[in-house]
Amino acid sequence: MTQPWFDPNHYAWIPGTAYGVIAGLMGGLVGWLVPRGRAREFILRSWFTLWVVAIALLIAGTVALIDGQPWGVWYGLLLPGAIGTLVVGANSLLILKTYRAVEERRLAAKDLL
């Protein structure tokens, strides 16, 4: 086994906790702003960045597993990466669909005037 990348007893909780807090805050912003059609550019860029970070964590966790790192190292990276990749990726389609529906409603209301 190789030397651990970091001490899993002290630092293994940080990637998942940090990603979870940021994803939770972004989820709150998405639930608040997307149905109103607000901050489209900010939400889409931030959501894409969140997805890229999840994919990076997934890759880092997979590399750690293949490299023979201790359980606390690869699991702390792989779990938030896998969950984030699936959840953020699946909700990306819903966010885009909701923004389109809001825009269609806005155009339909404008046509009524």
Image (cartoon, rainbow, N blue to C red):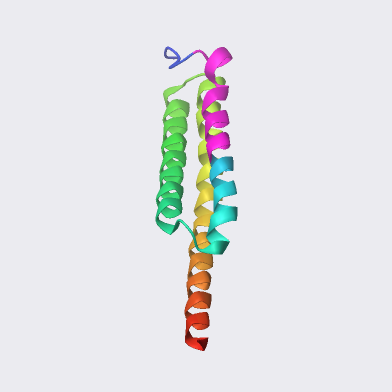
Which residue occupies the extreme bottom position in the image? 112
Q: Give percent across and percent down for residue 13.
A: 57, 23
Position of residue 27 in the picture relative to residue 56 (left or right):
right
Of residues 59 and 24, the one drawn nearer to the viewer in this rendering: 24
Range drawn in magenta? 7-22
Q: Give percent across and percent down for residue 103.
A: 48, 72
Q: Give percent across and percent down for residue 86.
A: 54, 49
Question: Residue 16 is drawn in which quadrant?
Answer: top right
What quarter of the picture does the N terminus occupy? top left
Q: Residue at x 58, y 13 (%)?
A: 9
Prevailing secondary structure of the magenta residues: helix
Position of residue 29 in the picture relative to residue 45 (left or right):
right
Q: Give percent across and percent down for residue 67.
A: 42, 24
Residue 10 on the magenta span: yes
Q: Is residue 67 above or below residue 38?
A: above
Q: Is residue 73 above or below residue 19?
A: above
Of residues 96 and 67, the one drawn nearer to the viewer in this rendering: 96
Q: Is residue 12 above or below residue 26?
A: above
